[in-house]
Image: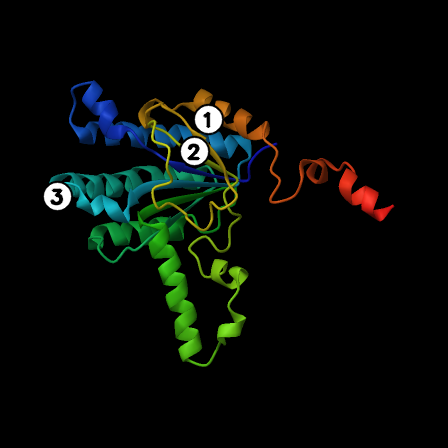
Amino acid sequence: MLPRHVAIIMDGNGRWARQRQMPRIAGHRAGVENVREIVRFCAESGIEVLTLFAFSSENWRRPPNEIKLLLDLFVIAIEEEIERLHEAGVRLRIIGDDAPFPPKLKKCIAAAEARTANNTRLNLVIAANYGGRWDLTEAVRKLAQKIENNELSTSDISPELIAENLSLADLPEPDLFIRSGGEQRISNYLLWQLAYSELYFTDRLWPDFGTEDFETALHSYAARQRRFGMTGDQVSGKRDTVAGSQAE
């Protein structure tokens, strides 16, 4: 059983660099190199959506020089990878609040999204200056505006309507969530969308998280039974003994 949508927190770049007595940005560059391999693997495996957490809304708390280097690296990565992604049939989308981004980065993002807009082999979503709470706040703001404009009533609000106003509204919710680097939390990432995702944590630092590690995560996912509130017997198609006895 292959997940349609895999969401990843790519953690451990800085520690990877520190272990090698290298500057932190070297770890981020190595992390970008690894993204290329994971994207290729997903495209070849038939996974429909890969969402990567590249820069959180909390990352602005990092030292200013590291933030600048990260944003510069983001521009370089887009410029270097966009034609390769396009040729591979990958559609690129960036989600998050782009308001603080420098004009050059905004221009690169717009050009990359336009270039790959019609590709269908793999949806590659990069969450940049993204936070799950921000995503939910934006959805609520949109709905509140519609209520204010008399386009919507409060009684119309439903989980489905909220979901329709989130960043990934047109894509399936993540089936599998992976976090590298040893931490075991979701760190304000896709808070709504991860409600029923299978969680997989690994100590492997992101630059070292290769395709074999990805396959291990996929095997772990395939071995799980996703019940979504039902009983195991219901999911497996077996007759529920309690319900059956009551029916009889």
Q: Quadrant of residue 14?
A: top left
**Residue 214's mark?**
1
Question: Dot 3 corresponds to which residue?
Answer: 64
Say whether residue 185 is visible: yes
Answer yes or no: do the residues labelled 2 and 1 have beta carbons within 8 Å? Answer: yes
Q: Amino acid at mark 2?
A: Ile
- Residue drawn at the location 33% of the way across and 27% of the way down: 181
Work out whether residue 101 or residue 200 is closer to the camera in this orientation and state it. 200
Answer yes or no: do the residues labelled 2 and 3 have beta carbons within 8 Å? Answer: no
Quote the CA–CA distance across marks 3 and 1: 33 Å
The residue mark sitting in front, 2 or 3, is: 2
Work out whether residue 111 or residue 155 is closer to the camera in this orientation and state it. 155
Q: Is residue 72 above or below residue 216?
A: below
- Residue 192 locus on image (x, y percent): 45, 51
Quote the CA–CA distance across marks 2 and 1: 9 Å
Residue that lies at the very extreme toward the right in this rendered image: 248
User: In the rendered structure, which disc, 2 or 1, sits on the residue that comes first in sequence?
Assistant: 2
- Residue drawn at the location 58% of the way across and 33% of the way down: 2
**Residue 103's mark?**
none
Numbered disc 1: secondary structure: helix
Q: How many marks?
A: 3
Q: Quadrant of residue 55?
A: top left
- Residue 40 locus on image (x, y percent): 45, 31
Side of 26 where 208 appears, left or right:
right
Question: Dot 2 corresponds to which residue?
Answer: 178
